[in-house]
Image (tube, rainbow, N blue to C red):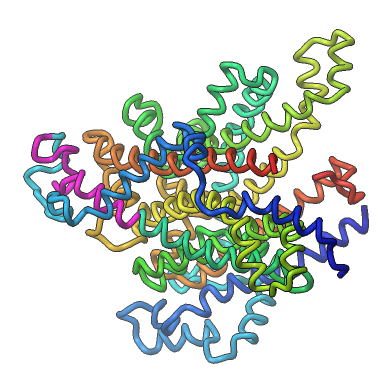
Amino acid sequence: MLSFVRGKVLHLVPVLFVVTCFSFLLTALLPGDLALVMAGPNATPQTVAALRSELRLDQPLPARYVDWVTRAVRGDLGTSPRSHQTVLSSIRERLPISLELLLLAELIGLVVAVPVGVASAYRAGGTLDQAASGAAFGILAIPGFVVAIVLIYLFAVQLDLVPATGYTPLTTNPLENLRSFFLPALTVGLTEAAAYTRLLRSDMIATLQEDYIAMARAKGLPTWHILLRHALKPSSFTLLTVLGINIGRLMGGALIVETIFALPGIGRLLVESIYARDLIVVQGVVAFVAVAFVLVNFGVDLLYAVLDPRIRHGRAVA
Amino acid sequence: MAAPSPDVVVEAIVVAAPVTAAGRPPAQWRRLGASFWLPAGWLGVVTLLAVLAPLLHLADPNLQDLANRTGPPSPDHVMGTDDLGRDMLSRLVWGARISLTVGYASTLLGMTVGTLIGMGAGYLRGRLEAVIVAAMDALLAFPALVLILAITTFAGHDIRIIVGVIGFLGIPAFARVARANTLAVAQREFVLAARAMGAGELRILGLEILPNIVAPVLTFGLLGVAVAMIAEGTLAFLGLSVPPPAASWGAMIAEGRGDLDTAPLVSLIPAAVFFLTIFALNLAADRLRRVIDVRASRI
């Protein structure tokens, strides 16, 4: 197990290096004078000069990278020249909202996918299976912003059940908070549900062919017991991996969904900073999002190995 | 390497012949069935309309008629008008030009570069392969949408830049598919035979490997077009694709958002067209993949 972890960590280091390099180069390699772009057309030469020294534009690239990474590791991602708020405190302020969205969306995804996936696999080729597969295929083909528009039309305009956009903090009114999260969480959750259903179904079909399932059947165990107690856990590895990837992805907020529904999460922060050409925030948030994604995936890899002994002993069968 | 015996060579040529043969008999095209030809037909019609847009005598897609805002379908405007009174049908057709151009062009870019890189990695192996695989993994780990947003914001919203960025981000996925398929093909007998007959590396890559990985790569390319179109649609939806008043499907969906309660069709029609096109690309790719897989398992 230890050598497995060491190998994974060794793999993690170059990936983190490349990812931070990308975040850094993103702003460093853009054409034009960065300070001028950020300061805007009406800035005084003093503002531009101050920005230039803040961004250390007078130093060579590698020095700027090392300087930036060193400060980032200490938690200093810079301060926005626009809002005069540190990037880290902006992230800290927005992160809970993105996390709540992540949690609710994954919950919706799993609550739909596990029963539907198990039932589809149990009667593979049956009516439910065909309907679920068709629906999943269709949902996966709809881009997120189209799902959002259709859901707003159905739930907010036609049924008038929930607000179309807007955000109520959890501490102000928990019920209103849940209502404001309903549509965004459903938008993300539906796509997740479709993906998870397909994964669980195909893995479960394979598991149900195993001898020990036939054995359990021969013993006369009830079907639900076999499905949930014997077959579900060994069938859920792929599902868990993809769940992990999605959690890593959503740590950075759901860019589009947060924008459409006016949820002030990490994704919205990024889009706002991009609109405002606030490069320091863009750079900091991108680095945060990318590193979070890599680290969550790293955690999932480790968890995967804990769950499946074949992997940590390097005997995994493809 | 030991020279293969002549009978191995002969066998290899016989095995290789049906795979490399250009032009398939119509029977195999028919075997793809309606679940391929229906979506392919839709894609064909949409592409044809987009290409022929200047010849179609449609209303000016940018002509505003503020007296006729969000008008219902009428003989003058078959699909009604949008929030500025512009003809929806005309904007859909002209919007298809942008969506499809980005979809096809960026996929072509990502596919060409990615396939070359992937083939190189899968055939030449060694340290080069390790470096390429690591670089591609890192690029895949980077949140793509964030990169697209950031670059287009600062580099401009020119369609060539959008195509370039989306295409660039498609490279690792195509490199992976190409490498995996190259690995499978590179060990086959006909490659050995070609090498035994003195073919150079480039000749082997171009004439033996490439024809055998083209089908899976092109199938994946259909999915790539869908992904690229979604990326452009997302940019357009955020107002970061080609600047207005140019019509783009994503922008049309976004523009109609404010009128969902009074004139839902302004948003829902482009949403439906966009969905059908992405769905068609997915269906066609799925069907092709199944057919190719069956053929591969029969060889």
Left or right? Give the position of A165 relative to B144. Answer: left
Percent x, y of residue A285: 56, 63
Measured along the vertical axis of the image, is residue A197 above or below residue B87?
Answer: above
Residue at (84% x, 20% y) in the render: A213
**In the image, residue B39 lies in the stretch drawn in magenta:** no
**Quadrant in the picture for residue A160:** top left
Q: Is residue B187 positioned above or below B263 on the image?
A: below
Count of labels in the image: 0
Residue B141 in view (yes/no): no
Q: Would residue A41 be found to the left or right of residue A38 on screen?
A: left
Work out which quarter of the rendered image holds the C terminus of chain A and state it.
top right
Residue B288: which quarter of the image?
Answer: top right
Residue A125 point in image, percent of width and height: 62, 20
Q: Nearer the viewer, residue A101 or A8?
A: A8
Residue at 92% from the left image edge and 49% from the top image edge: A313
Residue located farthest toward the left when viewing the structure as drawn: B67
Front residue of A289/B266: it is B266
Would you say residue A137 is visible in this rendering? yes
Image height of B283 relative to A1, above or below: above
The percent position of residue A276, horizontal first and vertical second, equals 39, 67
Q: Farthest residue in the top direction?
A: A220
User: Residue placed at 53% from the left, 65% from the top?
Assistant: B112
For the magenta stretch, what is the residue range?
B74-99
Residue drawn at 36 percent across, 52 percent down: B237
Residue B76: within the magenta? yes
x, y (%) of residue A48?
41, 85
B273 relative to B146 in the view: left or right: left
